[in-house]
Image (tube, rainbow, N blue to C red):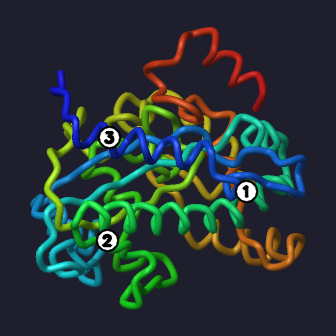
Amino acid sequence: MESFDLKRHRIMLDFTAFVESSADNRLPSHNNTRIYDAPLIGFASAKDPLFSDFKDSQVIGPQFIIPIDWLPEAETVISYFLPFSKAIRNSNRFRGLPSEIWIDAKTFGERFNNIARKYLVEYLTLLDGTALAPSLDERFISYETASNWSERHIAYVAGLGTFGLHRALITERGCAGRIGSVITTLKYKSTERNYKTYYDYCPYLTEGKCGVCMKRCPVSAIKKKERQKQICRRYLTNDVAANFAASQACGKCSVSVPCEYSRPLSLKKEENESIKKSI
C-alpha cells in the first residue's frame, strides 16, 4: 500500500480541480459536452533507469530523449491520463467511420491537453521549481511512427498503466483518453508501479483471453501479436481524413472493449458481457 504524500496530493487535487472546471474542457459545438473526466496522475524519478531502456530500437529507439537531457537538473516527471467522458465514448460505439464528436474531442481535446501541460508548468514554477513539457518544447520531433518523447511510455514509468494489444495505455480508468507530462526540478516521491511488464493489464497478451479490440478495428489492423501501424495509418489518411477535413482519429479499438474505462480485471462479469454485446 502506497503511503500518503501531502505534496503530491496537493498537486493532484489542484490539477483535478483545474481539469474539471476549465471551460476549455468542453465542446461548445456539441451542447458544451465535457471532453475529459477527472485525471489520473503519476510521478516518476527523472533518473529512473527505464527511461534509458526506451532508447532500445525494440522499444522506442535512439531518438528518445531522457528527462535529464531535456532538463539537466530534473528530479521528477509528472504524467497524467485524461479519460474521455462517457458522452464522448458513447458517440463512437457504432461501426464504420468515427463520430463527429469523437473527431472534435481529439482535436479540441489535444488543444486542452496542451493547456493542461502549460498549467502544470506554471503551477510548478510558482512553487519555485523549473519545469517544461517536452511535447511543447522546440526540440520535440514527431516522426512517422514514433517521436523523441512518448507520452504512453512516460505514463508507464509513472505507474499509470501498461500497454494493450491495441498499443494504447490501459490505466485504472481505461484506455480511451489522452496523456500528457511535464518534467520538473522539484522532487516528489515516485508512484509505485503495480505491474512488472509492459503488458500486465492486457488479458489477451498475458492470458490469451479477450482480443475484442481486434474485432473492433474497422480495417483489421490489430493482429494477434500487435497493431500494424501502416494499415492503421493508411485508413486514417485515406478514409478518415477524407471525410473529416484532414482530421485523423478513429478510436474504435478503445471503446466497447473491456479496457475502455477501467482495467479489465476490475470489471464485473455482467459488465464485460454488456460490452461484448455492443460490439
User: Helix, strand, or loop for circle 1?
Assistant: helix
Residue 60: image tag? 2
Q: Residues within 10 Å of mark 3 (few under 14, many from 20)?
A: few
Query: Residue 199, located in which quarter of the rendered image?
Result: top left
For image coordinates 43% across by 44% down, the residue present is 14
Front residue (pair 234, 256): 256
- Look at the image and tell me in which quarter the N terminus lies: top left
Q: What amino acid does circle 1 point to? A: Ala
Image coords of residue 268 (percent x, y): 54, 11
Instruction: Kindly report which numbered mark, 1 or 2, lies closer to the viewer in this rendering.
Output: 1
For image coordinates 34% across by 79% down, the residue present is 148
Q: Residues within 10 Å of mark 1 (few under 14, many from 20)?
A: many
For image coordinates 15% across by 26% down, the residue present is 3
Image coords of residue 63 (percent x, y): 29, 84
Placement of 60 over or under 217, stated as above or below: below
Q: CA distance from mark 1 to mark 2?
A: 27 Å
Q: Which residue is mark 1?
A: 105
Circles 1 and 2: CB distance less than 8 Å? no
